[in-house]
Image: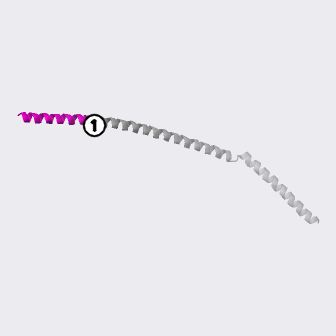
């Protein structure tokens, strides 16, 4: 009976040791899991911040592009100035051509 009691005590000690070992492993894994969750949350927040920043930059770029397009597009006043300048140049050219033609006739 003493041998059986001794074996049972050894089994109990072994089970107690395994139980403590598993508790420690569970604590370690729980800590690792909590760290992973915190890291994931931080990475998710970082990505969200980067996405927000990228969207702001795209919006700014679009705004700048629209502003530049408006600046580059001639206004109706600019069109009138160009048309007047073209008409003046055409009249000068026509007058010069007429003078050249008249000079030829006279000669």
Q: Nearer the viewer, residue 27 or 67?
A: 27
| Left or right, 40 with reference to 51 | left
Residue 3 position, x and y percent, is 7, 35
In the picture provided, is 45 more to the left or to the right than 19?
right
Q: Who's the residue at 37% across and 36% down the image?
A: 35
- Residue furthest right in the image: 107
Dividing the picture into quarters, in which one does residue 100 lie? bottom right
Q: Horizontally, is 31 left or right of 56 in the view?
A: left
Q: How is the image coloured?
A: one colour
In the rendered structure, does residue 40 fall within the stretch colored magenta? no
Residue bearing mark 1: 25
Residue toward you, 101 or 67: 67
Name the residue nearer the viewer: 31 or 94.
31
- x and y percentages locating residue 104 in the rendered image: 91, 65
Please tell me which residue is depicted at 17% across the width and 34% down the height of the picture: 13
Residue displayed at 91% across by 62% down = 102
Q: Main secondary structure of the magenta part?
A: helix
User: Foreground residue, 52 or 14?
Assistant: 14
Q: Residues within 10 Å of mark 1 (few under 14, many from 20)?
A: few
- Quadrant where the C terminus is found in the figure: bottom right
Residue at (58, 44) in percent of width and height? 61
Q: Which residues are magenta?
A: 1-26
């Amino acid at each position: 009976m003493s041998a059986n009691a001794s074996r049972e005590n050894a089994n109990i000690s072994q089970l107690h040791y395994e139980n403590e070992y598993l508790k420690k492993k569970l604590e370690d894994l729980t800590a690792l899991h909590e760290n992973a969750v915190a890291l994931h949350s931080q990475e998710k927040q970082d990505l969200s911040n980067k996405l927000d920043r990228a969207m702001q930059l795209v919006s700014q770029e679009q705004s700048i592009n629209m502003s530049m397009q408006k600046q580059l597009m001639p206004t109706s006043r600019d069109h009138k100035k160009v048309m007047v300048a073209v008409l003046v140049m055409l009249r000068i050219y026509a007058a010069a051509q007429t003078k050249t033609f008249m000079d030829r006739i006279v000669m």
